[in-house]
Image (cartoon, rainbow, N blue to C red):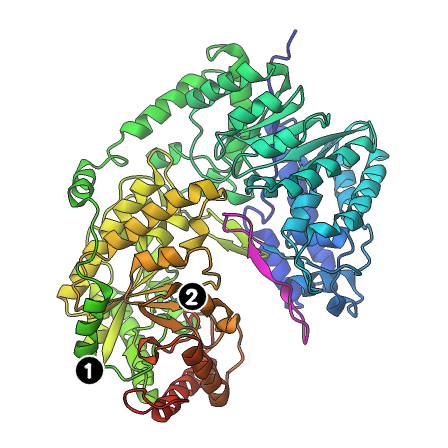
Amino acid sequence: MPDKRMKTYVVGFPRIGERRELKKVLEKFWSRKITFDSVIKITRILRKKHWFYQKEAGIDFISSNDFSLYDSMLDTAIMLGAIPERFERIRDGHERYFAMARGAQGTEAMEMTKWFNTNYHYIVPELSKDMGFSLNPKKLINEYREARELRIKTKINVIGPITFLTLSKRVDGDDDTLSLLPQILPHYVSLLNQLARLDDEIVIQFDEPSLVRDPDPRTLDLFRSSYEALNRVDSNLKLVVMTYFDHAKEAVKALKGIPVYGVGLDFVHGRENLDALTDTEGKKVIAGLVDGRNVWRNDYEKTLALLGTIENHVDSQDIILSTSCSLLHTPYSLEHEEMMEQEIRSWMSFSREKLRELTDISTIFYEGGFGVASNGAFEQNRKIIQERYSSSRVLNKAVRRRVRSIGSKKREGTFPARNEVQKQLFALPLLPTTTIGSFPQTEEIRRLRQDYKNGTISDKEYGEGIRRYIDLCLEFQQTIGLDVLVHGEPERNDMVEYFAEKLSGFLLTQNGWVQSYGSRCVKPPVIYGDTARPKPMTVDIISYAQSKTTRFVKGILTGPVTILNWSFVRDDLERASVCEQIAVAIRDEIEDLQNAGIRMIQVDEAAFKEGYPLRKSRALEYEKWAVRCFQLAVSTAAPETQIHTHMCYSDFNDIIHTIEKMDADVIAIETARSGNRLLKVFVERGYKNEIGPGIYDIHSPRVPSVKELEEKIRQRIKALPPVSRLWINPDCGLKTRDWDEVKQSLKNMAAAAKKIRRELGPEGEKPI
Ligand code: GLN
Ligand code: ZN
């Protein structure tokens, strides 16, 4: 007799706390307001709460060690004794841990980077050949025991050896992290030996998402041999190899003949995993069918159909129903969204609601949809899903018609032709100086926005406050002699949220926080329906700024691809089509700015690169529509209007051809930390458009000297001739810095540019 319910599995649960308790307690601890005992107290409460949510929902596989005080990659580095030398002097364990994550007086933090194509950031372990790895399993074991004391038997999550190594970096001059496998694998083996003694039958989940990134034959070999060895350690252990975010066909094949207990496969973002099922050979298939990366209610009918297909390949006894990845990437619960309109809310599902979906689906699957145990859940789900798809809030025919009628559009004219017109018209000096847009977000300006939002000040008072800030910004920029000015973005809390508030089809949640890194969270907007711009979004403010000066003021907009990539996107329409609608809205805004006399407009695409799919075979498709949307957004700009763009990362090697196609008149990029290395690709490629390679790092409070900046400018001129094409600017926006730092740094930047300009002569004819 089969079990009346399919077993349910949660890859991992959020940890920051529904009220961001972890963030709050950590930040208090870091500023020495409380002791570590308070941190311990709060984190115990959080773990207990999270375990019970899952237990009460009836989840069969609940994790321990999905909790972290900062990040799980960092925890794994600690577990393996991979402590970089510079932290060894710090004796206290917690002090050392947080120093590795955040830096300490005189000791630089470890690098942080994006976790695959999510907006979560992990700490990059620093490895070297002779660092003396050792095993430190205390955290894992303690958390397992903690749950056990609460009568919850958990599976234990741990980052697998292949993913750990592929995401690490070497600091001893060699690039090959995988060659360190023989040094760390024995510690994984000892870990398993210790865990085997903890309890009967323990499930260990090895997270191996690296395997969805086009693994090469060597990686697959090492993967295979590692799990062969790990699976042999103790028959008391059940090993799950967990993958997510895309398909893992090659990995499943590589596990052939190795009888691990289960493989975790993502069927939401990796439909090709269906093909992989022919190679699962009686292993449990942890079927990721409830989306861990989005906020939409699961469509039971579709999911059940997919389960049916899976069942064609795998015995239903071997299917375990799961989230597609850790729920770390979705907010906690809709319970905390009192203000959300009921209709829209009924379409959504956050982490806790997803637990319920898992148990619903597992019950319905055996009942065929109409039994008593599921209590009408199937019918109810179907009704809500149908309402969603046919709601007038979702489908806006006028928007669809308009987007269709515009079609694909590009700007008129080629860059050389536009450039000639613009050079004449703007008559800027050589090496024109500018900034990326935002100026310091002072306490005062934050309060002003907050008061306005809460309704405690009038439109008039708010407007005056904003204009006062703009006046100050402009005055400062003129005094130090910058060439192209910005208004400073005082009206924006965040570059995406600001536009999301103004576009139809978007909503902002009250508490939809997801962890971004350490104690930091973001609250992505939700795109639920067709989107359009009911009225101009920035025209008043930019026109005001332009009216106050005879220099050019750049209008600053966030680009369509970035708005898309930093939002929760509806799942009933292709991302490309959603992006196209946003592009049309930005296009209208550019047209209005242009009609209001704004001559330079910057369209920021800070998140362009992170939208790239993990599989190379899918990259081309993304590039195609993302570039098309950018081109569409700027297509109303006349040749006389100068389009700028900005991207804040430093690796352009893979995407230089895309940058070329975007064809902005000027691109400002981050280069301060990487120096000339990254500019090489622009030279090799023969990139023709104008370019502003950032000359100082805005992430650091340090003020660069005039001399140092002159040197940076000289380097840029040498690396990237001709000089007529170069702009001088910082790496990114200045909103996180203090006014004092900004004033000094920009003053030095302007002075350095002037000095070099004099050396070069009016036409840039003299060598430097
Ligand atoms: N214009 C934005 C700013 O200056 C750009 C921010 C970003 O690229 N992250 O703040
Ligand atoms: Zn930036």
Residue name at image x 50 percent, y 51 percent: 119
Image check: 708 left or right of 645?
right
The image position of residue 323, as x and y in percent, is 55, 32
Neighbour class for label 2 at 10 Å: few (<14), some, many (≥20)?
few
The image position of residue 581, as x and y in percent, is 26, 45
Q: Quadrant of ligand 1?
A: bottom left
Residue name at image x 57 percent, y 34 percent: 248
Q: Is residue 225 above or below residue 20?
A: above
Quadrant where the image shows the N terminus? top right
Please name which of the two marks, 1 or 2, marks the residue nearer to the observer: 2
The image position of residue 625, as x and y in percent, is 32, 46
Determine the image quadrant of residue 570.
Answer: top left
Q: Is residue 523 visible?
A: no
- The amino acid pointed to by label 1 is Thr
Residue name at image x 72 percent, y 51 percent: 179
Callout 1: CB less than 8 Å from ligand 1: no
Q: Is residue 105 magenta?
A: yes
Image check: 8 left or right of 490?
right
The disc placed on residue 550 is: 1
Residue at numbered disc 2: 684
Q: Is residue 361 above or below residue 562?
A: above
Determine the image quadrant of residue 316.
Answer: top right
- The amino acid pointed to by label 2 is Glu
Q: Main secondary structure of the magenta part?
A: loop
Determine the image quadrant of residue 619.
Answer: top left
Residue nearer the viewer, 164 or 761: 761
Q: Is residue 452 visible?
A: yes
Instruction: Tell me where the magenta segment starts and ends, as one range.
Output: 102-121
